[in-house]
Amino acid sequence: GVDEYPSMPWFGMDIGGTLCKLVYFEPKDMMQGETEEVEILKNIRKYLTKNSSYGKSGHRDTHLQMDNVQLGGVLGTIHFIRFPTSQMEKFLCLANQKGMAKLITTVCATGGGAYKFEEDFKKSVNMKLEKCDEFESLLRGLLYIDKNNPTTECYYWCNPTDEIKCAKVNYDFSQPYPFLLVNVGSGVSILAVNSPTDYSRVSGTSLGGGTFLGLCCLLTGCNTFEEAIELAAEGDHTNVDKLVKDIYGGDYVKFGLPGDLVASSFGQMNSRERRNKVSKQDLARATLVTITNNIGSIAIMCAKQRKIERVVFVGNFLRVNPIAMKLLAYAMEYWSGGQMKALFLKHEGYFGAVGCLLRIMP
Ligand code: ADP
């Protein structure tokens, strides 16, 4: 029975540089009894599952919810919740209002915030953060989620450059090794994974999702990621970037460089005339293309060096961001001569938190 397990509620947390990811396991059969503890547990469950937004900035991604999953021996539903890490104080306040402090809880947490906010959790909600390694959690969460959604979790983009024919296609990820795991969060980490226990961090870059958002806010005056993506969707990066054909008048045939390839990101913006003509949308698009192509090219180098064909992109930078995914899909295929494949996962930003949730099981 449930007695062998740690006391509920069961959470896993990934407190990142930008977003805090919280996964909550809702047991199908709630504990019986009328103690204060059970009442609080029921309240927390009700609050989390009846709403899909919490306060001003908390969101539950209902489309990602997983029903009828086994955690340990318990059947239930996994819920996926996120809020900006900058709102941690408000989150703790809310958790306190819901009675969290009265429960004796340990929560496994990863991400830098597991260290940064450790004291705050203890003070505000009497919660002990059991710190888990970021990459270990990421990988454990990823393998668990894929195993539970074997036909629907992993996909790729076919015909990524054709607006009409382009589509998501499911990919069987049951034999994944070796693969490269590119986590695009605020920054970027790249892992080479040979087995569930054999992996290493092979590269990374500070030019990540945080850079895209930061530069986009500076250049366009936008304030949210969603706004930045919407602007980018309507823009044209060729008004901002200098292309091979802007320099050569066409393709650079001798070295196989197509005319439409970006030769210099933002390379047109030294001209005042060009600057006066450029729109916010163009600037947003160019920022997105610049950051995405840079990540793609680092990923390709890593994959080539290790002769890895499957490259899996995760992290919230890919959230509501088909432009970036299609660019990556195209880049991987083109620059590897069709050898490499860019793969994506539905629960893109939540694997670290799921890995932490799994850690509470003995
Ligand atoms: P971290 O753990 O570093 O916070 P995430 O995987 O959560 O990393 O990704 C954070 C990135 O995701 C941001 O830098 C931004 O590019 C993108 N992003 C997607 N959705 C949002 C959002 N609602 N708010 C802020 N950033 C978002």
Image: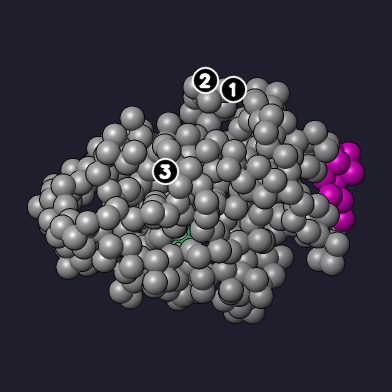
**Outermost residue, right side:** 253
Q: Quadrant where the N terminus lies?
A: top left
Image vertical order of residue 358 relative to residue 324, above or below: above
First in sequence: mark 2 vs mark 3:
3
Q: Position of residue 291 (x, y in %)?
A: 57, 53
The residues bearing labels 3 and 1 have C-alpha atoms spaced at a distance of 30 Å
**Image point (38%, 54%), residue name:** 29
Find disc 3 in the rendering and name its residue.
74
Specify few, some or many for label 3: CA neighbours under 10 Å numbering under 14, 14-19, or 20 or more.
some
Highlighted magenta segment, given as a residue range: 250-261
What whole-number distance in Å separates the C-alpha atoms at marks 2 and 3?
A: 29 Å
Callout 1 environment at 10 Å: few (<14), some (14 to 19), or many (20+)? some
User: Is residue 257 part of the magenta span, yes or no?
Assistant: yes
Instruction: Find ligand 1 in the image and state its quadrant.
Output: bottom left
Residue that sits furthest to the front in the current view: 33
The quarter of the image holding the C terminus is top left
Mark 2 or 3: in front is: 3
Q: Quadrant of residue 246?
A: bottom right
Is disc 3 in contact with disc 1, using a CB cutoff of under 8 Å?
A: no
Q: Is residue 278 magenta?
A: no
Tags 1 and 2 touching, CB below 8 Å: yes
The residue that disc 2 covers is: 198
Q: Residues within 10 Å of mark 2 (few under 14, many from 20)?
A: few
Query: Would you name the residue on which mark 1 appears?
Result: 194
**Relative to the observer, which residue lies in front, 160 or 267?**
160
Residue 161 rendering spot, x and y as whole percentages: 80, 58
Answer left or right for 33 relative to 358.
left
Residue for point 57% across, 68% down:
229
Residue drawn at (45%, 76%) of the image: 221
The amino acid pointed to by label 1 is: Asn
- Identify the residue shown where x is 43% and y is 38%: 73
